[in-house]
Amino acid sequence: MGRFGTTGDAAIAGVTVIALCTGVWLLTSGPDAPAPPQPSAAEAHAGLGLRQSVAPGLPPSPPDRIRIPAIGVNAPLMGLGLTRTGSLDVPPAEQKNLAGWYEAGTTPGETGTAIVAGHVDNADGPAVFYHLGALKKGSTIEVDRRDGSVARFQVDAIELYDTKNFPDKKVYGAAARPELRVITCGGGYSRSTGYQGNVVVFAHLTGSA
């Protein structure tokens, strides 16, 4: 499996910030629609105090499903490629309980940085990662892989980045251990431009079954 390069990182960051973050539900529901939860400063890397146990990387295997029990996520995963402009594609917005992973990159559980992305809402209401900002450090993420294994990750941090200052290298850069990023929209909301930022979950592999 290929790894992210610096050029690819910038292109993927651009589409993550824009394509996922139109906020269709808030746009059509008006000011009374509740905004998705946002991570607190306590969940950022600066406050990381967990004792980390890192498992060795697994062989490459495509992922089929992601589960985040703490926020009720249990969703199938589809492969995401690149658009004609070289940016990461996104899952169909009408399928609210569907997430995607960058299938030309690291597979979840393999050594490196695996990327999973999903919508925060669609025209009908909350979507697969609506509650991602409510996640806490130490939470578990499980990924069912096509080889029959389950990769288990522990959340290290949940951070919110403004679109204008999105840290491409920090989020998409290569890692020496098996890591996972889960990304959706967040931050302030504008009816003209949608969400103003991204919620990013950082996690590392702790084991498999």
Image (spheres, rainbow, N blue to C red):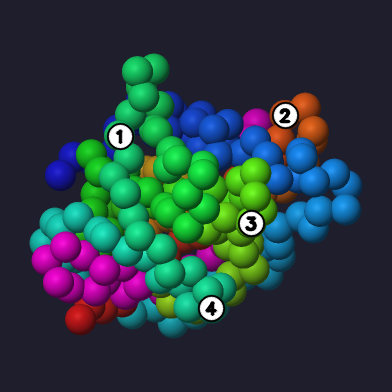
Judge left or right: residue 143 versus residue 165.
left
Neighbours of disc 4 within 10 Å: few (<14), some (14-19), many (20+):
some
Q: In this view of the protein, which residue sits in the foreground, 157 or 1?
A: 1
Circle 1: residue type: Gly
In x, y percent, where is residue 141?
Answer: 41, 72
Residue annotated with mark 2: 193
Disc number lying in front (3 or 4):
3
How far apart are the two marked residues, 1 and 2, measured between alpha carbons?
25 Å
Element under disc 1: loop
Which mark is drawn over residue 126?
3
Which mark is drawn over residue 81?
1
In x, y percent, where is residue 178?
Answer: 27, 62
Element under disc 4: helix
Q: In this view of the protein, which residue sits in the foreground, 84 or 202?
A: 84
- Which numbered disc flags the more N-terminal residue, 2 or 3? 3
Residue annotated with mark 4: 70
Q: Quadrant of residue 110?
A: bottom left
Circle 3: residue type: Pro
Q: Is residue 103 visible?
A: yes
Element under disc 2: loop
Q: Residue furthest top?
A: 85
| Badge 2 vs badge 3, beta-carbon distance below 8 Å | no
Q: Residue furthest right?
A: 31
Circle 4: residue type: Ala
How far apart are the two marked residues, 1 and 4, measured between alpha carbons?
29 Å
Neighbours of disc 3 within 10 Å: few (<14), some (14-19), many (20+):
many
Q: Is residue 168 visible?
A: no
- Magenta range: 142-168
- Which numbered disc flags the more N-terminal residue, 2 or 4? 4
Circle 2: residue type: Thr
